[in-house]
Structures are given as structure tokens and as C-alpha cells.
Amino acid sequence: MSDFNVLKAQLSDSRYALQARLGERQPKIGIILGSGLGVLAEDIENAVSVHFGDIPHMKRSTAMTHVGQFVCGNLGGKCVIAMQGRLHGYEGNTPREIAYPVWLMHELGVEVLITTNAAGAINPAFEVGDFCIMTDHINFTGGNPIVGTEPNELAMRFFSMYEAYDPALRALVKEVAREAEIPVREGVYLGLLGPSFETPAEIRAFRAWGADTVAMSVIHEVIAARHVGMRVLGISLVSNMACGVQASNPSDFEVFQVALERSDDFCHLVTETVERLAL
């Protein structure tokens, strides 16, 4: 049996177990809440929570502030399923293990993925506390979740990453931000393995490549989502200037403090965008 045939069987087990906990809830929107951004899950109404470790074949989250659970219920008048925390490569997870919950949400019927994270700003015009809508990405993690034998058992092996970040969804969140007078940026996101922060020399190289922000997540999730045809919206909170930019030397404390300060605007952006989504 090919590795992707095994994956399909595992996803079937996971979907059965998770759907049993969700009852009649049928989410069409999935939300991944990054570092310091899990507070949005508290706004989900009529919610049921399921820890990653209670789902067959799912890995547990070990990152700080990542609760590591699915929260499913109503947000902005729609049924959503949120990951309150995510899986990272620096925790020892493979690209496929990181992608697994995205494929699982797709098995549940999710059509739109909103992935969020805290990121460092490479672009010196950005400021700490800005929100940046991802327009594209650079995969510098060294991996890809579709690598393996017979991936077309799940979806076609070769697929386009052109406009991987859906233009209509980007326009929608910009409209929400404009009406709420929340400044937003747009830019190219670069994903790394971590867990070490980048060196100043690396940041200079990434800027030359055209990257505006950098962090240690998102990439494998988006590849997995596009592999199975999900529409994707990516939003970063600029939690720090990248290493060496304006003499910055990033730390975990800085990341979480900025997320706390910007939580109200973040929750408004995502909730209002969900409410206006036409599905």
C-alpha cells in the first residue's frame, strides 16, 4: 500500500472520530490561529473543543501559547473550525504531519482556509503591530508535504501555486480593514524551519529575494490546502522587526506581547471577513 493510501485511511479514521465529537456541526471555513492569536477561539459560540491528542493519527502541539485543540462552532454567523495552535517543523514534525490537520479539515467539508501567524518584518517600511496580508510565499523550510509515492491518491501530484493566496479573499479582508480603519500591508512571506531566529545575513539575503515577512509556519499548511483545492487567506501580525532590521534582536516575549496588544483588531478582521464570505 502506498504512503498516500495509508494517509487516506488515517484521515478517514480521524474524520470519523472528530465528526463524532462535532455532532451536526458542518464547518466550511477553517482557521489556524498562530502564536499569541488563539484568543479568537474564545469568540466562537456554541463551541465544542477537541484536543489534537484525542484524534487518531494527530500529533500534539508543544509550542508555547499553542493550546493544541480544534474549536468548532459559530463565528460571524457561520460554522467554523479553528485550530487553537498549530504544528511546526521545529517541534520535530514532518511536513506531512504539519499538513495533516489541513487535510482533515478538508475531509470535514472545509472549503476556505484562513491561516494566521506572528511574523518578523523584513521590509523596513513595515512597523511592529501591522497586519500583513500574504500575497505569495517562499518555501525555505527544506520540505514539502506532497513528497511521496502516489500522492494522486489524495489529489493530483502536480498542481499550481499561482495565486495560492486567493485574490478575492485578499480584497475582502482589505475592505474590512479599510472600513474599520485598521491599517494593513501586503507582502511576500518566507517560511523557515526554525526554531532559531534568523541571522542578520540571512535577513539581508531574504530581502534580496523579495520577502517582506518571515516566520516558522504556514508554508506546509498552504501547500496542503492548495493540493486539495481549498481557497486560502493568509494574515500575519508583524510582532517584531526581523533580526538586524533597525537593530532588532527578536524574542518570544516580544511576539506574545504584541499579539496581546493587537488582539481586538485581529479578532475584528477575521470575524468580519468570515461574516462576509459567500459560500
Image (cartoon, rainbow, N blue to C red):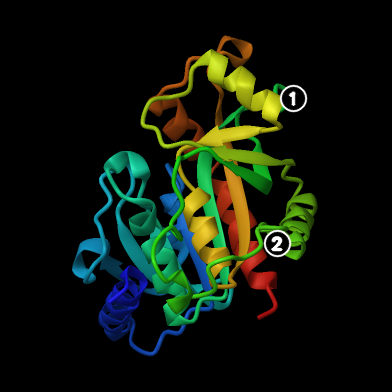
- Is residue 152 positioned above or below 138 on the image? below
Of the residues under marks 2 and 1, which one precedes in the sequence?
A: 1
Query: Which residue matches tag 2?
Result: 166
| Kind of residue sitting beneath label 1 | Ala
> Residue 81 versus residue 266: which sits nearer the camera?
81
Image coordinates for residue 35, horizontal then vertical, percent: 42, 42
Mark 2 in CB contact with mark 1 (< 8 angstroms):
no
Question: Quarter of the image containing the C terminus?
Answer: bottom right
- Left/right placement of residue 83 relative to residue 68 reads right
Q: Residue furthest top?
A: 247
Local secondary structure at mark 1: loop
Image coordinates for residue 145, horizontal then vertical, percent: 43, 57
Local secondary structure at mark 2: loop
Binning the other alpha carbons within 10 Å of mark 2 as few (below 14), some (14 to 19) or many (20 upward) gives some
| Kind of residue sitting beneath label 2 | Asp
Image coordinates for residue 113, horizontal then vertical, percent: 55, 65
Q: Residue 22: tell me if it is visible.
A: yes
- Is residue 200 positioned above or below 145 on the image? above
Query: Which residue matches tag 1?
Result: 125
Binning the other alpha carbons within 10 Å of mark 1 as few (below 14), some (14 to 19) or many (20 upward) gives few
Answer with the quarter of the image where residue 148 lies.
bottom left
Q: CA distance from mark 2 to mark 1?
A: 24 Å
Q: Which circle, 2 or 1, is nearer the viewer?
A: 2
Image coordinates for residue 193, horizontal then vertical, percent: 41, 37
